[in-house]
């Protein structure tokens, strides 16, 4: 969390204003992202995981200048890149690229692969269509494991996996320092997903590009990431080393997330199910438009304290070297950053009443 | 199903190919060419001077003859030639009105849609006011301010029609603006001007052309109406509307023929513009939803050769099922080939496969719900020991919802948006148990409580859009369970839901199965869900069953290379961050199944034998496997065998 | 629902105001041409005559003041006098003619929506069947035919050749109910036939979409039969786009009735407006357009309200 990081997000807030209504009070803005901070080192991958409505994609869109940042700063190579002004936008785009979720709609249906990849080369390196640009496009296709026959293909003539490879090649075309992959493999079949993940990891090893990898599947995010952050309703509830968090989560929501991923192994899954059922709770997450004053996970948390209903906990250090936002570590049982797994196993059965 | 690689064909060639296959499109294009000639060079087609009167007054109101192909009018002028010259007035009208409409409407819509916010709302409010007024009235307003003439009227029509283009352009711009490819273009660093000109505009063009064709027809209609009223073209001009204006008193005395030549010219022209618009729309369309409407005729189903599973506890038994789909060009793809399965009371059968493997189609076809134009061509289905292969739709209605309930993947999309949720849950109760509406609604409330929907009575009165995905899926389960069916088919019941909600839904299904002792067929792409819930597993690939076994055997002793590979590629199967094992290549499409074993091109154990003949589904100790090498290959590592 | 209707009612006020502004501006534009005074005083008019007319019409005042005065008159029901006949009040002229037009448009819309819906449903039940294909060809041709041509055909065939009905004239409802009905029957059919075709086409295509939807598949999986599937599941959803298209057609029919009335020799709004245009009779035209505009606004309101009945999302959002 030092100020000298290559890429750094500091206390990021993104709000969406509600539309004014006639004859009625304007509802308060929806706070999609609330005070998120993380950093990425060159050549490393930071994974952001969360379910729908967690605000993880909004973080990506804020970094990519697609939505306005309400408060906080984003820094790249020491430069402030929060709400980049128009004249500086091109220089920013040269450094930060993205691979977006839907392989269908993220490619323009009326353009062939050559144009999809070549547009960025022409824009940033001033290389007009010609043999030099063609060679670069062929090299990029080769890098993502595609042959030259795809140069003339339209997106609808390619499969989901192939389209996603073209998206990766498009991002690589401008030789960026950071690529944001927003649910880049979510829409793909399992057997294709692993191919695309391998392409991403190989590209990173070869070019040293940093990744912000966003997804809803903790297993996938953990696999590709060095560090992960877990988001719930706009808050980063836990962050730190990917494997350590997976093995010893310190936030009950992270633990619930781990327990909810079904394992392809009946024996392991039986114990996961048991763990999952300790969260036996049919409550729904609160609506982002009407957030409670306390911790947003309080109504689903099997070990919630009274204080959880009243105030949002501040980040505190966790055993994995990262941070956690949960009262259990500072109030009540004072876990002090240790894993929450054993605590939940014992407490959830006896129903805590602290 | 997913779109897959097709033979590369340029969009332009495909467009003209489809246009020339459409008889109505050809008709309109031919008529269009004739009109164009009549406009540019009327003398080429006309046989007489359109203004030449018969001074002898001998040949007035004649019918068609060799000299006057369409007869003569009240002044003895040649109808045919007058109609030919009239085309010029029609095209002149289109030219004036369309130019104004496009030049005003398109940029305004593009600006309004791209800009959004307050500016957009203000522009659209004014636009909608003008849009809602009758075009004839707006044309009249312009005529009275200037002077009555067809050209002035067309200025008014052009302004009125611009509101149509503004609306369309804005709608497309708004829609395209939300597409990820526009975000991608911004991320690449392209300027707004480039994005509008090279990304939005091409996607707009096709809609604009369709709209322009249809509006051209409307412009001619309105122009003719104004001329007919006497406030359009000058009463001396050979304009179709003016001719009809002259005929309107005469037809009562001289017969209806006086209306026919200009009337038919007008109608055919408007019709051809409309048909042209439709034909262009159909030819551009990337999906051909219209073709899917054609009725599937009931055809004979070839009988299955494999005997059915027997026993009192067998709920559903499917044998040797083939399902075929003809595509637009009439080629037939086999979506399912020789699918067999059975499920017993109290048991959960997991069906697993990737997209396009045919797992959902198996379920639909087993219930007689094969979507048109697909059809089952071979096989046999038994439900509770009864042969249901050839049931009629109304015979099926008595079974579906009563003996078998279905849960779908998209919980909100399967609820009717216009009907209250309570009413939808009550529906099967009213149909199958003859409950009154009141009793059925009360039972629906109990069912919602049973699937643990909070505040069930209030929820009954809500519409689907007021439900979250998880709650809607609970309502879906309540609906499927309403008549306590013997079989529950769940097609990806938790895939569209958040992972923490997925667990709740799976728990709920286990709970109701325990309570009602029903059989469940659980369709999923996720082997983790299979590990959680299935007793027996059926693995599908390329429209075929490739392996069936107990859940333990599939995970610990798989017999088919695909089952093993599918398990290996899951990130859950790996600690660490190294390269994941992959299945090379891509999922095959039904239009081009590989020769021999359908998995052969992606299989690590492939030999020549695999690519020659399609392997049969062999029985090995009660389990099934479709692989010629199943006895010789080692799919389980040594250390795991010992463990 | 009451709240929703109230909201839509309020939303109609700005629309009516906009219509008033447009109508008023027509007169302003005409006097900028100098064409009003010329119309009254004739070509080569003396300046005295012109200024007398302009003073008479109050054209000396600033435009906003005149607009407020005019609007005040309009709201109190005074649409002024005909420019060419000071004794004829515009409101009276319109009052004599509007009911014929309203009868024809109204009845044509009733015919259009009822027969159009029946035919649309019939076509959607067996998409691609013989009935569907023949209906779609007939509908396409009828949409291309203007009401006044259909009117001439009907008039010739049914009134003249068969002699079943009078080819021309209008009988007010106050005189005779059957006379009224027989006098508007043919014009309403002429104006209504394209409406039938438009409704049929739209309903058929949106029904086809609805019948392919996931919720219809799910309803079939619950054992819902063919008839309730169409009536209860597909129809309400398919009606939403159909009502939209019907609303557009209703506005168009209000304009197109002018030509149909003339075919049947009915002295309705059509004749009034056309004569006013030819005579450049600005006060009559202004009043006529205002009234027609208000009728359009009312039709829009009815369409919006019927959305509320069909689409719960619209109703609950307000």
Image (tube, coloured by chain):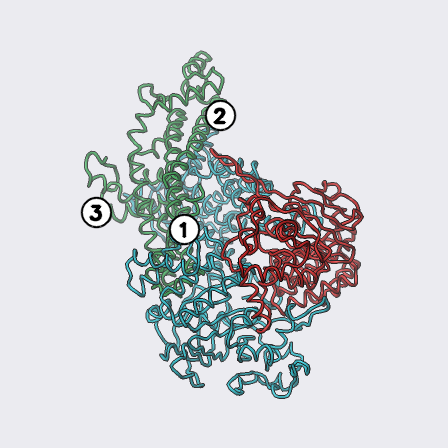
- Same-subunit check for callouts 3 and 1: no
**Does residue C191 appear in the picture of this structure?**
yes
Q: Which of marks 2 and 1 is in front?
A: 1
The residue beneath circle 3 is C164
Provide the letter of the chain coloured cyan: B
Instruction: Give whichever of discs 2 and 3 has the lower sequence position.
Output: 2
Q: Distance between the residues labelled 2 and 3?
A: 48 Å
- Same-subunit check for callouts 2 and 3: yes
Q: Give the chain letter at badge 1.
A: B
The residue beneath circle 2 is C29
Tell me what hue chain A is rendered in: red
Name the mark on residue B462: 1
SS for tag 3? loop
Q: Nearer the viewer, mark 3 or mark 1?
A: 1
Left-right relation of A260 to B634: left
Q: Give the chain letter at badge 2.
A: C
- Same-subunit check for callouts 2 and 1: no
Q: Distance between the residues labelled 2 and 1?
A: 54 Å
Left-right relation of C160 to B106: left
- Location of residue C121 with respect to B297 vertically, above or below: above
Q: Alpha-carbon neighbours of circle 3 within 10 Å: few (<14), some, or many (≥20)?
A: few
**Does residue B51 appear in the picture of this structure?**
no
């Amino acid at each position: 969390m030092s100020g000298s990081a290559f890429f750094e997000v500091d206390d990021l807030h993104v709000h969406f204003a509600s539309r004014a209504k006639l004859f009625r009070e304007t509802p308060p803005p929806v706070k999609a992202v609330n005070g998120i901070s993380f950093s990425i080192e060159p050549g490393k991958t930071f994974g952001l995981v969360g379910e729908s409505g967690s605000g993880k994609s909004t973080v990506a869109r804020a970094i990519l200048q697609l939505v306005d940042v309400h408060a906080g700063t984003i820094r790249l190579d020491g430069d402030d890149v929060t709400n980049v002004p128009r004249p500086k936008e091109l220089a920013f785009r040269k450094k930060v690229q993205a691979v977006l979720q839907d392989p269908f709609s993220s490619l323009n249906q009326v353009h062939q692969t050559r144009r999809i990849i070549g547009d960025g080369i022409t824009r940033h390196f001033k290389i007009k269509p010609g043999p030099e640009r063609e060679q670069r496009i062929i090299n990029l296709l080769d890098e993502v494991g595609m042959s030259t026959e795809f140069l003339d293909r339209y997106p609808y003539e390619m499969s989901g996996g192939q389209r996603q490879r073209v998206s990766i090649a498009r991002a690589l075309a401008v030789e960026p320092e950071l690529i944001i992959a927003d649910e880049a493999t979510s829409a793909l079949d399992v057997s294709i997903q692993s191919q695309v993940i391998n392409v991403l990891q190989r590209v990173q090893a070869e070019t040293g590009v940093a990744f912000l990898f966003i997804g809803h599947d903790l297993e996938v995010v953990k696999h590709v990431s060095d560090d992960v952050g877990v988001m719930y309703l706009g808050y980063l509830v836990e962050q730190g080393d990917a494997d350590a968090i997976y093995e010893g989560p310190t936030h009950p929501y992270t633990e619930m997330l781990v327990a909810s991923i079904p394992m392809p192994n009946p024996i392991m899954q039986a114990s996961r199910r048991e763990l999952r059922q300790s969260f036996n709770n049919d409550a729904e997450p609160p609506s982002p438009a009407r957030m409670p004053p306390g911790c947003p996970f309080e109504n689903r948390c099997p070990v919630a304290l009274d204080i959880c209903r009243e105030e949002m906990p501040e980040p505190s250090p966790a055993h994995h070297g990262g941070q956690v936002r949960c009262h259990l570590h500072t109030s009540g049982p004072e876990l002090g950053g240790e894993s929450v797994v054993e605590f939940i196993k014992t407490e959830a059965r006896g129903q805590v009443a602290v | 199903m997913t779109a897959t690689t097709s033979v590369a064909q340029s969009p332009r060639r495909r467009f003209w190919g489809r246009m020339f296959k459409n008889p109505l499109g050809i008709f309109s294009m031919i008529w269009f060419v004739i009109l164009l000639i009549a406009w540019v060079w009327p003398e080429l087609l006309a046989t007489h001077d359109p203004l030449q009167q018969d001074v002898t007054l001998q040949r007035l109101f004649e019918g068609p003859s060799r000299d006057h192909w369409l007869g003569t009018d009240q002044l003895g002028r040649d109808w045919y030639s007058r109609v030919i010259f009239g085309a010029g007035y029609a095209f002149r009208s289109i030219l004036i009105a369309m130019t104004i409409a496009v030049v005003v409407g398109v940029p305004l819509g593009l600006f309004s849609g791209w800009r959004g916010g307050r500016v957009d709302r203000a522009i659209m409010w004014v636009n909608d006011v003008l849009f809602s007024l009758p075009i004839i009235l707006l044309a009249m307003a312009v005529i009275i301010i200037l002077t009555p003439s067809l050209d002035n009227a067309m200025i008014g029509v052009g302004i009125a029609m611009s509101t149509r283009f503004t609306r369309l352009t804005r709608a497309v711009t708004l829609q395209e603006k939300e597409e990820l490819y526009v975000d991608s273009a911004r991320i690449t660093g392209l300027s707004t001007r480039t994005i509008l000109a090279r990304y939005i505009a091409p996607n707009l063009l096709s809609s604009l052309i369709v709209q322009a064709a249809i509006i051209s027809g409307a412009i001619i209609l309105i122009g003719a109406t104004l001329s007919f009223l006497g406030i359009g073209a000058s009463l001396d001009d050979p304009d179709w509307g003016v001719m009809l204006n002259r005929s309107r008193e005469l037809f009562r005395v001289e017969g209806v023929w006086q209306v026919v030549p200009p009337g038919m010219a007008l109608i055919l022209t408007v019709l051809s513009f409309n048909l042209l618009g439709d034909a262009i729309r159909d030819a551009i369309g990337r999906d051909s939803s219209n073709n899917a409407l054609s009725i599937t005729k009931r055809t004979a189903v070839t009988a299955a050769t494999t005997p059915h599973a027997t026993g009192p506890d067998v709920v559903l038994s499917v044998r040797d099922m083939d399902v075929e789909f003809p595509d637009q060009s009439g080629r037939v793809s086999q979506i399912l080939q020789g699918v067999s399965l059975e499920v017993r009371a109290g048991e959960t059968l997991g069906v697993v496969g990737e997209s396009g493997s045919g797992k959902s189609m198996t379920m639909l076809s087993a219930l007689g719900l094969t979507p048109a134009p697909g059809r089952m061509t071979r096989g046999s289905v038994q439900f509770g020991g009864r042969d249901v292969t050839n049931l009629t739709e109304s015979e099926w209605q008595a079974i579906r919802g009563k003996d078998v309930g279905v849960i779908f993947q998209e919980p909100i999309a399967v609820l009717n948006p216009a009907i209250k949720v309570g009413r939808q849950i009550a529906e099967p109760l009213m149909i199958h148990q003859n409950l009154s509406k009141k009793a059925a609604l009360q039972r629906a409330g109990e069912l919602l409580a049973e699937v643990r929907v909070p505040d069930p009575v209030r929820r009954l009165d809500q519409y689907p859009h007021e439900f979250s995905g998880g709650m809607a899926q609970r309502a879906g389960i309540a609906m499927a369970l309403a008549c306590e069916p013997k079989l529950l088919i769940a097609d990806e019941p938790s895939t569209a839901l958040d992972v923490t909600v997925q667990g709740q839904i799976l728990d709920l299904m286990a709970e109701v199965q325990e309570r009602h002792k029903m059989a469940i067929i659980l369709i999923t792409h996720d082997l983790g869900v299979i590990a959680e819930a299935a007793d027996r597993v059926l693995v599908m690939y390329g429209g075929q069953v490739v392996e069936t076994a107990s859940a333990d055997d599939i995970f610990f002793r798989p017999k088919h290379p695909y089952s093993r590979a599918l398990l290996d590629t899951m990130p859950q199967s790996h600690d660490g961050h190294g390269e994941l094992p992959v299945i090379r290549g891509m999922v095959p499409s039904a239009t081009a199944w590989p020769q021999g074993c359908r998995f052969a091109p992606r299989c690590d154990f492939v030999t020549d034998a695999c690519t020659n003949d399609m392997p049969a589904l062999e029985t090995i100790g009660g389990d099934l496997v479709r692989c010629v090498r199943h006895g010789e290959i080692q799919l389980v590592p040594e250390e795991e065998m010992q463990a | 629902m009451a709240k929703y209707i109230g909201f839509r009612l309020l939303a109609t006020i700005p629309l009516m105001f906009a219509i008033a502004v447009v109508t008023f501006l027509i007169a302003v534009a005409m006097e900028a041409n100098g064409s009003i005074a010329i119309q009254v005083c004739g070509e080569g008019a003396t300046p005295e005559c012109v200024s007398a007319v302009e003073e008479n019409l109050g054209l000396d005042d600033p435009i906003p003041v005149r607009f407020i005065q005019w609007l005040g008159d309009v709201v109190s029901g005074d649409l002024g006098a005909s420019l060419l006949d000071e004794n004829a009040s515009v409101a009276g002229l319109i009052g004599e003619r509007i009911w014929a037009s309203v009868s024809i448009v109204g009845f044509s819309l009733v015919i259009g929506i009822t027969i159009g819906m029946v035919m649309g449903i019939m076509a959607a039940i067996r998409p691609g069947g013989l009935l569907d294909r023949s209906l779609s060809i007939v509908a396409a041709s009828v949409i291309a035919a203007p009401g006044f041509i259909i009117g001439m055909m009907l008039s010739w065939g049914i009134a003249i050749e068969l002699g079943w009905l009078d080819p021309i004239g209008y009988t007010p409802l106050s005189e005779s109910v059957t006379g009224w009905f027989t006098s508007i029957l043919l014009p309403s059919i002429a104006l209504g036939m394209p409406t039938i075709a438009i409704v049929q086409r739209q309903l058929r295509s949106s029904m086809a979409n609805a019948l392919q939807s996931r919720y219809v598949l799910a309803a079939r999986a619950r054992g819902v039969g063919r008839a309730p599937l169409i009536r209860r599941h597909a129809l309400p959803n398919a009606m939403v786009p159909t009502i939209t298209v019907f609303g557009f057609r209703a506005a168009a029919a209000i304009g197109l009735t002018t030509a149909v009335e003339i075919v049947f020799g009915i002295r309705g709004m059509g004749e009034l407006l056309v004569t006013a245009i030819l005579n450049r009779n600005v006060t009559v035209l202004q009043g006529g357009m205002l009234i027609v505009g208000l009728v359009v606004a009312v039709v829009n309101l009815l369409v919006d309200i019927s959305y509320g009945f069909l689409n719960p999302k619209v109703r609950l959002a307000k």
